[in-house]
Image (cartoon, grey):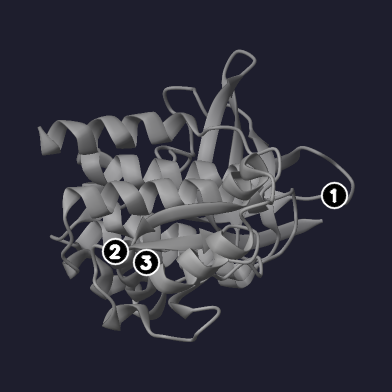
Amino acid sequence: MICKTEAIVLKSMKFRDSSKIVTFYTRQYGKLKAVAKGARDTKSKFGASLEPMTRVELVIYRKDNRDLQLVTQSEILSLYKRVHSDLDRMAVAMTSLELVDKVMHDEEENARLYSVIVECLEVLEMTEGKTESILLAFELRLLALFGFRPAFDRCALCSKHLAEINPEALAQLQTETGSVLCPSCCEQERAASRFVNVKRRTEESHKARVETFVVLQKFLDLPLGEIPAIGYSLSVGNEMSETLRLYIRQHFEGLKPLKSIRVFESIISHESS
């Protein structure tokens, strides 16, 4: 069956003498792998349309229950030139797309996720603010789409708003539920559970400053285009990254460390030195 759909190129690899196997995230069919015959030829009709981080309109020959589809046509809709040419933007984009590739199964339609991916790339292309914030906001949106939306705004026990608490105090994330305990309730919980196996408690919870959770909640609540303008310190940024890494690993079983995250972290480390 011949199908037409919008797609984001997640990754591509060489195949045989002159072709490519390309992984797309499509609006209609979710993640999809396809062969583009002759894509590496000098005069290929595909041009640059199969490069990662590009939004395209695809024409594919698709058959159900086949692992590898066939691309017959691909035209660029958005090239995202600044994302491709700026290392900071590229690191965020590649890490976001690699995460999508790792957690999504083939051909599971999710039009909302497709829209979030496109919005992420568009904001990356236009923003002059903190590009690393976009990755954290994207990860939070991905978690929410899977039903794992955390609640960072108030304490799960006493319902006190974290924004009203000393930002330097330590709060505790319950990684299984995505809920947070304020500093006072952390102490009460620790006293009540002092006879519980310490190792098990450590695996199920994570402590970070109150400010870290407050900023993460803003990343959840505000439009993606406003996220890069939110200010925070390097130490809070590091805590946010660590917190989300732990929370993502908790809910996406078997997720291996992302290759792109090393590039992302090296850039952030270089900028802070």
Q: Position of residue 268 (x, y in %)?
A: 22, 38
Q: How many marks?
A: 3
Residue 213 disc label = 3
Crowd band around label 1 with a 10 angstrom C-alpha radius: few (<14), some (14–19), many (20+): few
Q: Quadrant of the N terminus?
A: bottom right
Q: Amino acid at mark 2?
A: Ala
Q: Nearer the viewer, residue 15 or 10?
A: 10
Disc 1 vs disc 2: which is toward the camera?
2
Residue located beneath label 1 in the image: 63
Residue 119 disc label = none
Q: Amino acid at mark 1?
A: Lys
Task: Report whether residue 260 is seen.
Answer: yes
Q: Nearer the viewer, residue 126 or 195?
A: 195
Residue that appears at 88% across and 51% down: 64
Q: Residue 38 vs residue 183: left or right? A: right
Q: Nearer the viewer, residue 228 or 62?
A: 228
Question: SS for tag 3?
Answer: helix
Q: Residue 84 vs residue 244: left or right? A: left
Q: CA distance from mark 2 to mark 3?
A: 11 Å
Q: Quadrant of residue 37?
A: top right
Residue 169 disc label = 2
> Quick check: marks 1 and 3 in contact, CB under 8 Å?
no
Residue that appears at 73% across and 49% down: 105
Q: CA distance from mark 1 to mark 3?
A: 46 Å
